[in-house]
Amino acid sequence: MAELIIQKEKIKTNIKTLSDYFEKKDIYWSLITKVFSGDLEFLNHILTPDVIKKIDSVGDSRLSSLKNLKAVNPNMKTIYIKPPAKIYADEIVQFADVSLNSSLSTILTLNESAKKLSKIHQIIIMIELGELREGVKRSDLMEFYEKVFNLTNIEVIGIGSNLGCMYGVEPNYDKLLQLSLYKELISAKFNKALHYISGGTSISLPLIEQNQIPKDINHFRVGEAAFFGISPLNNKVFLNLATDTFEFTANIIELEEKKMVPDGIISDANIGHTASYHEAQINETTTKAILDFGMLDVDKSDLEVVDQTIQFVGITSDMMVIDLGDNIKEDGTQKYRIGDQIRFIPNYMAVARLLNSKFISKKFI
């Protein structure tokens, strides 16, 4: 079985490094674990008391994941990081201490759920700053807050924004300054203190180093940097964090010398993806290997093969075909055999999909 290898100690060190960094900068932060889809084995391996003690909260975008977070540590402060669906309001209040919101009707429903459960549910209101994903329109913001502040079982603890996730609108000082100014307007008009000004994700981290973060921005929601060591703004390493935290290995289940060009009428009925070929190669042969994973497990474009001499041939639902060339080492011996493993470096989306696949095993080292 193909296997995802997880370097748990390197990930834990990354998280601790970020905690120390944010503490020195007087910034609260939430560790976002959605890449792991609430995998209980992962949560138990990574979210140990020494790791979470300096984290303000742990967040996810799936309700099932929040349930697992609370199962691992009932006292852990949890944050639901997308606008909740009204139908799940009771469970959101039960398992999320904080939620990000942009819909008045949903917040009204959360208020009723909090009443039933005798709880005060905390919310951060998201503001639309150009990414055109979740967020209250800036022109509606003051009226929106006036209605929300009067709810009996809802406590507004902050405002926030999301940038860079859908259209790739880059966070910058001007965008975050807008968020800071809205905080000032709300505080002045309603005489309400907002504890969190949540303007940052992994993509915003380089702005801290460039002194491009307004002083009021005091909360970051970070996942990718903690688990992969990089900021997606520039795909560069942040704070010398470890980047070799995951590896994916697949087994060679067939290895044969075969033609480079398929033989027969090619139709649209195939379910896989293939590399292009040239008719000039019709009589050429090469060594091809079949690996034990497919499209149901991961998108091949999210994997980088460690051996750069290997070429992609095709992938179907549960198998991948690669080209090994002549499969001969420099010393003339055979390079790969049946049963050998091919190593890949998975990116964020690859890890997310691999952890969701029941056909992929996990190994923590």
Image (tube, rainbow, N blue to C red):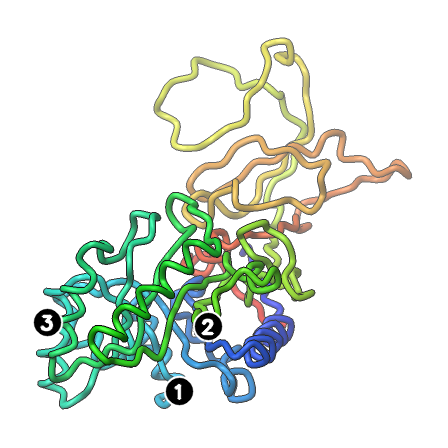
* Residue 127, above or below 123: above
Res 116 → quadrant: bottom left
Amino acid under disc 1:
Asn
* Residue 81, above or below 349: below
Query: Which residue is farthest front?
Result: 188
Which mark, by number, is residue 297?
Answer: none
Question: Disc 1 designates what residue?
Answer: 73
Q: Earlier in the sequence, mark 3 or mark 2?
A: 2
Q: Earlier in the sequence, mark 1 or mark 2?
A: 2
Question: Disc 2 designates what residue?
Answer: 31
Q: Position of residue 217 (x, y in %)?
A: 44, 69
Q: CA distance from mark 3 to mark 2?
A: 27 Å
Amino acid under disc 2:
Leu
Q: CA distance from mark 1 to mark 3?
A: 29 Å
Q: Residue at the spot x=43%, y=32% of the render?
A: 272
* Residue 254, above or below 239: above
Q: Earlier in the sequence, mark 1 or mark 3?
A: 1
